[in-house]
Image (tube, rainbow, N blue to C red):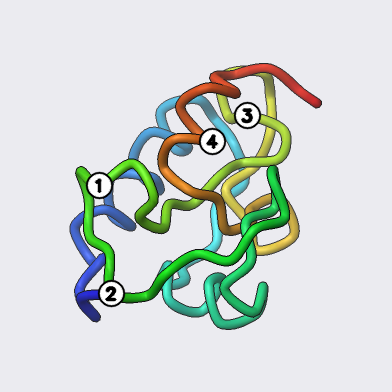
Amino acid sequence: MREGGWTQAVGYRRRARLAKAVTESFRPIEIFERDSWECGICARPVERSRCAPDPLSASVDHIVPVSLGGDHTRANVRLAHLRCNIRRGNRVV
């Protein structure tokens, strides 16, 4: 996985601010490490070497979507496969 993720993180924060959500500044890699590289949706391992747009690459999933009033904070995000995250959409599971 590329260490970057910076531009992606800026995009998350920007969308959260536009939605008037509480935001924290963090890098996606912090969340991936915290979650031990395990998808929070399907509970399967996420391979570090995969990069977007690979469906099995790592992505940041908002547990309560920002579009539904969730915040962009460490407590409200988790690691998810890109495929799992897209399938879930903005629903609260």
Q: Which mark is residue 84?
A: 4
| Residue linked to disc 3 | 65
Amino acid type, residue under disc 4 in the picture: Cys
User: Quick one: label 3, few (<14), some, or many (20+) residues within 10 Å?
Assistant: some
State the SS at label 3: loop
State the SS at label 2: loop
CA distance separating discs 1 and 4? 12 Å
Q: Which badge, 3 or 2, is on the more N-terminal residue?
A: 2
| Residue linked to disc 1 | 54
CA distance separating discs 3 and 4? 14 Å
User: Quick one: label 1, few (<14), some, or many (20+) residues within 10 Å?
Assistant: few
Kindly check if marks 4 and 2 are in contact, taking CB atoms under 8 A apart as contact: no
Kindly check if marks 1 and 4 are in contact, taking CB atoms under 8 A apart as contact: no
Position of residue 30 measured from the top left corner of the image (x, y, whole percent): 51, 79
CA distance separating discs 3 and 2? 26 Å
Amino acid type, residue under disc 3 in the picture: Pro
Q: Which badge, 1 or 3, is on the more N-terminal residue?
A: 1
